[in-house]
Amino acid sequence: MFRYGKVSAVMISLLLWFLCGPNIIVKAADFAEEGGGFVSDEVIAEAESLAHAEVIAAFYKMELKSYTNGIAVFGCLDPKREVSVSRVRRRSAGMPELSLNRIYSIQDTYLPPDTSMQYHHAEVDTPAAWKYSTGKGVTVAVVDTGINTEHAEFEGRILANSYNSVSGVIGFSDIQDNHGHGTHVCGIIGARLDDYNKVCGVAPDSRLMVIKACDEENQLKSGAVLRAINYAADNGADIINLSMGRSYFDENGKIDGDEIEHNIIINAVNKGVVVVCAAGNSKGNRAMFPAAYPEAIAVSAVKQGKVFDDSYSNYGPEIDFSAPGTKIYSTNIGGNSYAIKNGTSMASPVVAGVAALIKSLNPDYTPKQIKNAMVITATDMGDPGWDKFYGYGVVNSYSSLLLDLPLKGDCNGDGKIDAKDLTFIKMFLLGRERYNPVMDLNRDGKVDIADLSYLKRNLAGIQGFGLGSY
């Protein structure tokens, strides 16, 4: 822990940076519906009773067409407009939010959305991971410049207890992003998983607690940032993403850690919150603060191909993991628009998203267990084992979900690897056991005879005996 007699001036006016390189603004999304995706003259809402539905209809000045089993259907001329307006009006009047009356079709094959412009999903294996976890039930706090609250990618995703740590306002009214950085980060973590929108987040069903910590000049100061971390830790966040930082060294070349800042990070982790931070974009040989604190997870950036991007990413002994951060396509401000950005600011939310996937599948995991799951399963790059550029490696979301800590091969969950695990897989293949992703020992996306052979060879090597034929 860092000890100081007084809080340094750096903490009074903390110069936090946006870890983004040049960005390319992409054409706004075309949201025209194909094939009648929703009823063209209706919206729906939850209602407690017929009388309640009539009150809602009167408030929004729409025709109540029907009500039953808690759902009201209303007639209107422009459903998208009515839905958009309801997000603003309902807050002051206590009315439910309206939704499009969507048309469903039978879907019995798993098909992820087009992620061709989001190469980072393939790099960290999220399409396979989504079969088992999409981050449902996990709250990720994004302390940043806010969010584009009207972007379709975030519809129904932003928590009501989002917060502005400068103004002290709780709710949706004061978290609008005027910079673009926070919106891009939020999209990397939690943009919706469907084939209607342009992008999807690493943890597309996670809940976003958006905490706007910048002032009117888009400056992030330590007072507001540390308040934001405390607020998140005290109000249900499971993971906090901090795509920001300040220099590791002061003007005299001394380590510039700060006790208050450090204690805030420690407090959050002690409350069970995973804190993920960007390492920095100065090509420096140390991670910036707060990533440099040992309780935080420090993330460096790789480009496509899982190659460390030495054109900007910091490195050093503090690095825990690396993740894609170069040419990352995500949400932007200005309607339903998108942008491509570079930076460890983009790598950090990839890791935060993977942590959310793990937490969703293992809700009782501590920050240490979540980190260990990523350590054990990261794709080792660079020098064997940990190194100063990649840390423990590039995070792998799919492998981290297959890991039923700590024993790979413990298919029946009894704490040891033995012949009973072979029998467990065999029973599954015969239809007598429930599926468990831990049984996919060779990590090819399915459980089959190859996994039996894998475990058989492994047992023979560990225990020195053969187990017969299966």
Image (tube, rainbow, N blue to C red):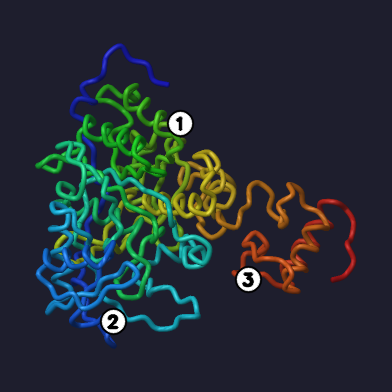
Identify which residue, 10 or 316, lies in the foreground: 10
- Which numbered mark, 1 or 2, is in the foreground of this view? 2
Residue at image mark 1: 270
The residue positioned 18% from the left and 60% from the top of the image is 87
Residue found at the very far bottom of the displayed protein: 35
Considering only order in the chain, which callout, 3 or 2, is on the residue closer to the N terminus?
2
Q: For numbered disc 3, what is the local secondary structure?
A: loop
Residue at image mark 2: 37
Considering only order in the chain, which callout, 2 or 1, is on the residue closer to the N terminus?
2
Q: How crowded is mark 1: few (under 14 residues within 10 Å), some or many (20 or more)?
A: some
Amino acid type, label 1 = Asn
Q: How crowded is mark 3: few (under 14 residues within 10 Å), some or many (20 or more)?
A: few
Picture coordinates of residue 386 (x, y %)?
55, 43
Picture coordinates of residue 458 (x, y %)?
78, 58
Image quarter of residue 236: top left
37 to the left or right of 466: left
The reply to whether residue 322 is visible in this rendering is: yes
The span from disc 3 to disc 1 (Cα, nearest Å) is: 37 Å
Q: In this view, does 17 lie above or below 33?
A: above
The residue positioned 65% from the left and 59% from the top of the image is 438
Quick check: marks 1 and 2 in contact, CB under 8 Å?
Answer: no
Identify which residue, 63 or 382, lies in the foreground: 63
Picture coordinates of residue 120 (x, y %)?
40, 62
Residue at image mark 3: 446
Q: Residues within 10 Å of mark 2 (few under 14, many from 20)?
A: some
Amino acid type, label 2 = Gly
The span from disc 2 to disc 3 (Cα, nearest Å) is: 33 Å
63 to the left or right of 132: left
